[in-house]
Image (cartoon, rainbow, N blue to C red):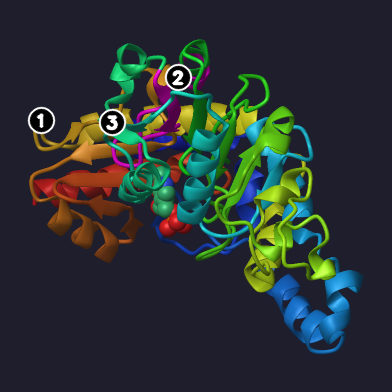
């Protein structure tokens, strides 16, 4: 056994989270794509079957009350809340991240004071956020300014209404300084909107502690909610009364069954709802969140950093010099839970890795992306992935 392989066994033996792997359906593939689609928690199929056969099949319409369907968006929001450092009553689950970015950004501009007519958006953002920010700007009469996150400080002014940022960059895995950037946005009198897709479930976020105004995120990555599972929207409690949704559906009406022609918003997190919740996906997500019972986000973060450190070390040892280059920061304070490696023939290399049982993904034009979900990835997986990568790029 190589020195790195024996280190991996020692690290796995000392890993207090190692037992959590049994909560998931996994095989002998090294699954490093949980930053795209989390693995299936083992108990979810049984729970979904109950939702379909009993709640829907037998109780039918009664389930809106008796099975708690109607209140699911806020109830599940409260389950996500501790994972992102939020007190209860501020998160509603529903719709996609894209739709929630739209709600949050337009609502942020509507909250901003008179004379604020600029939206700043992370210039390197996941495309959907940029497209929606452009449309939100047009609708609200604002100018959109794409800026690199490092340039946000100098770009802020008395004209800034809202700033849309990513906690972790989807391509490079770079973690941004949410507390400092939020403070800078506030110092300029603007509203901070954060996209947490690549941080929630992988590292502490501290929404309440850092005074974030609005945040959105998906649940199918590190929260393992399943393909297309609904996203969530956080509206800080003291801003909820001012949250003026651009999608004021009947589900966020103060009296949804009053069926009145005029809209009157509900109070609280409910205000972020639009229409009928996607119950099957939502309850699959609720079940999936059970894997977090007894697990602290801090422990997950510590293991995530150990995994990515070890991966970088193994890649350096196994890969011919100059063949791949990490674009993920080495500093822990700037690293999310993924490692992105630039590689000339990345698309081809990823295909060959997948054939050999190492699943990451490829991002155009030349990035190999490996996501590390501490709940089910171990150190032997990391060593094997780096070894197979080394053999693949050498061959
Ligand atoms: C950072 C980020 N924002 C937004 C989205 C879009 O999410 P959705 O397609 O669920 O709307 C994604 C999807 O992967 C993402 O990674």
Residue 87 location, quadrant: top right
Measured as percent of width and height from the top left, residue 181 is found at: 45, 18
The magenta stretch spans which residues?
Answer: 159-182
Residue 116 percent location from the top left of the image: 43, 25
Q: Is mark 3 within 8 Å of ligand 1?
A: no
Q: Does the segment drawn in magenta span residue 30?
A: no
Q: Nearer the viewer, residue 102 or 354?
A: 102
Which residue is outermost to the right?
Answer: 66
Q: Quadrant of the N terminus?
A: top left
Occupied quadrant, residue 172: top left
Q: Say if residue 33 shows up in the picture.
A: no
Q: Can you give x and y, in whole percent of width and height, for residue 77 in the image?
A: 71, 48
> What label does residue 321 carry, if any?
1
Left or right of residue 152: residue 218: right
User: Is residue 178 shown in magenta?
Assistant: yes
Q: Give the SS element for disc 2.
A: loop
Residue 175's label in the rendered image is none
Q: Which of label 2 and label 1 is nearer to you?
A: 2
In front: 296, or 72? 72
The CA distance from mark 3 to mark 1 is 39 Å
Q: Tell me how far mark 3 sits from mark 2, CA to CA.
A: 20 Å
Mark 3 lies on residue: 145
């Amino acid at each position: 056994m190589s020195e790195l392989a024996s280190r991996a066994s020692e690290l796995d033996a000392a890993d207090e989270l190692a037992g959590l792997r049994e909560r998931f359906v996994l095989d002998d593939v090294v699954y490093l794509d949980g930053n795209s689609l989390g693995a299936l928690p083992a108990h979810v199929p049984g729970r979904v079957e109950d939702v379909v056969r009993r709640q829907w099949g037998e109780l039918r319409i009664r389930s809106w009350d008796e099975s708690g369907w109607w209140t699911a968006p806020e109830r599940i929001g409260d389950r996500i809340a501790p994972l992102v450092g939020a007190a209860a009553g501020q998160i509603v689950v529903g719709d996609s991240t894209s739709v929630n970015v739209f709600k949050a950004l337009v609502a942020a501009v509507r909250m901003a004071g008179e004379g604020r007519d600029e939206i700043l958006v992370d210039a390197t953002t996941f495309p959907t956020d940029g497209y929606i920010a452009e449309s939100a700007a047009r609708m609200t009469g604002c100018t959109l300014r794409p800026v690199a996150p490092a340039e946000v400080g100098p770009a802020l002014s008395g004209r800034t209404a809202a700033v849309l940022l990513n906690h972790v960059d989807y391509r490079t895995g770079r973690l941004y300084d949410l507390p400092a950037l939020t403070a800078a946005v506030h110092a300029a009198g603007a509203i901070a909107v954060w996209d947490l897709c690549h941080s929630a479930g992988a590292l502490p976020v501290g929404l309440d502690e850092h005074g974030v105004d609005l945040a959105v995120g998906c649940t199918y990555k590190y929260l393992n909610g399943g393909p297309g599972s609904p996203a969530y929207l956080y509206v800080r409690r003291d801003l909820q009364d001012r949250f003026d949704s651009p999608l004021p559906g009947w589900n966020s009406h103060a009296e949804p069954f009053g069926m009145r022609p005029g809209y009157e918003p509900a109070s609280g997190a409910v205000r972020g709802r639009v229409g009928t919740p996607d119950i099957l996906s939502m309850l699959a997500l609720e079940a999936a969140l059970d894997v977090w019972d007894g697990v602290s986000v801090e422990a997950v973060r510590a293991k995530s950093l150990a995994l990515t450190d070890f991966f970088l070390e193994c890649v350096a040892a196994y890969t011919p010099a100059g063949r791949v280059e990490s674009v993920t920061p080495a500093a822990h304070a700037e690293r999310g839970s993924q490692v992105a490696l630039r590689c000339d023939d990345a698309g081809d290399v990823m295909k060959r890795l997948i054939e050999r049982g190492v699943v990451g993904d490829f991002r155009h034009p030349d990035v190999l992306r490996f996501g590390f979900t501490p709940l089910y990835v171990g150190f032997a997986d990391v060593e094997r992935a780096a070894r197979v990568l080394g053999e693949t790029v050498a061959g």
